[in-house]
Amino acid sequence: MSQIDIFDTTLRDGEQSAGINLNTAEKIEIARQLERLGVTIIESGFPASSPGDFDAVQRIAGTVKNSIVTGLARSIQSDIDRTWEALKGAEQPHIHIFLATSPIHMETKLFKTPEQVVELAVESVKYARKFFPLVQWSAEDASRSDPEFLAHIIRKVIEAGATTINLPDTVGYATPHEYGAMFKYMTDNVAGIEKVKLSAHCHNDLGMATANTLAAIENGATQIEGTINGIGERAGNVALEEIAVALHIRKQIFNIETGIKLNEIKRTSQLVSQLTGSLIQPNKAVVGKNAFAHESGIHQDGMLKNPLTYEIITPELIGDAATELVLGKHSGRHAFKDRAVKMGFDLTEEKLNKAFVEFKKLADSKKEIVEADLYVLLTDQQIHD
Ligand code: KIV
Ligand code: ZN
């Protein structure tokens, strides 16, 4: 089984979500939990962007020992200097430099020719290597860049000393086939690329971030970047918990180890949600409130007979409480009886049938039946002849 690096950017790209603003204490708490979760790299902020970010990155670098800590920098010397100030005390100083390579970004945002962009990328990587043993270089908007130009600039930055090359789908535009093909093209056309880490960084604008990340893995990516709960710019980044669990559940296909402690996922997700104030949609894969909730009678009956009928992930795998059989209007008699017994009621079949009829009437008028409703219903039957 081969190993893939997990680069967590909850504290940088994740914090770039509209409405999220974490203070240093909150960032440190999340970083500690990410370390417990077992991520390889924690992108803890953008030191040149504000004194608060600088402070958080510096303090996280002094606290976290089992994950590499990095900070983001533009391709300018003053950003690299500031990042070095923040990270020089880290166990393994790592910097993440980015520069856009797509025609639209180079022409209308950077106002630079492709040649100037190559020169700037090479200079910044060379400069960063004077301080940092680990330099990640990102081609912003890689998925909308010309593949030949991308291969050319990647060759140059590897020669300049980059140790990781990241190919972001910055605006979540690529399809899984296209994104995977870009990784294959670079692997086939850039000599020496096997000596560096090759990283995927997907945004979720079209809801394809998880599929795109898995396509990159199938085509040579050795590092993947994302955030907890998928928070991030616009529609967010890929949700790391989805990738970690998908690689685990479908390990026969991928044959890849992430080093993630899956039973820390739920705790990490809850912490990030609480501290960022970013709510998790109920039907969110892996960590949503309903991810292990079964409502319909047919599903509940199947679950009670053999949980594998409708559950491919167990809640215990991610450190969650047990599966929930939610009682609602679609529920069947089997689940109803099971709950009554669990609540301590020992009713005759006749009384149970009557209670079930009452339950169905109530369920038609309420979205969800809570335990207190059931208690009243079942007690009514218990005390009446
Ligand atoms: O999405 C992106 O392109 C980024 C870069 C800074 C790596 O977040
Ligand atoms: Zn991003």
Image (cartoon, rainbow, N blue to C red):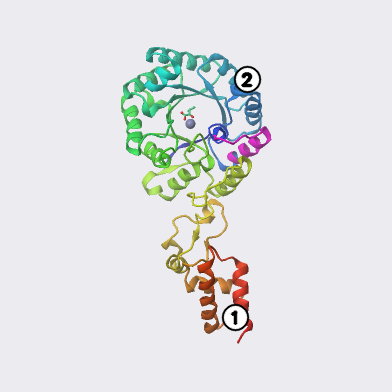
Task: Name the mark on residue 381.
Answer: 1
Give percent across and percent down for residue 362. Answer: 54, 71
Residue at mark 1 to residue at mark 2: CA–CA distance: 72 Å
Residue bearing mark 2: 85
**Relative depth, front residue between 229 and 31:** 229
Q: Quadrant of the C terminus?
A: bottom right
Q: Quadrant of the N terminus?
A: top left
Give percent across and percent down for residue 166. Answer: 44, 28
**Segment colored magenta:** 17-34
Give percent across and percent down for residue 315. Answer: 52, 55
**Relative depth, front residue between 133 and 215:** 215
Q: Is residue 3 above or below residue 374?
A: above
At 40% across and 34% down in the image, what residue appears? 221
Instruction: Please tell me whether the stretch drawn in magenta is mainly helix, strand or loop.
Output: helix
**Relative depth, front residue between 347 and 128:** 347
**Relative depth, front residue between 1 and 60:** 60
- Tell me where residue 146 sits by quadrant: top left
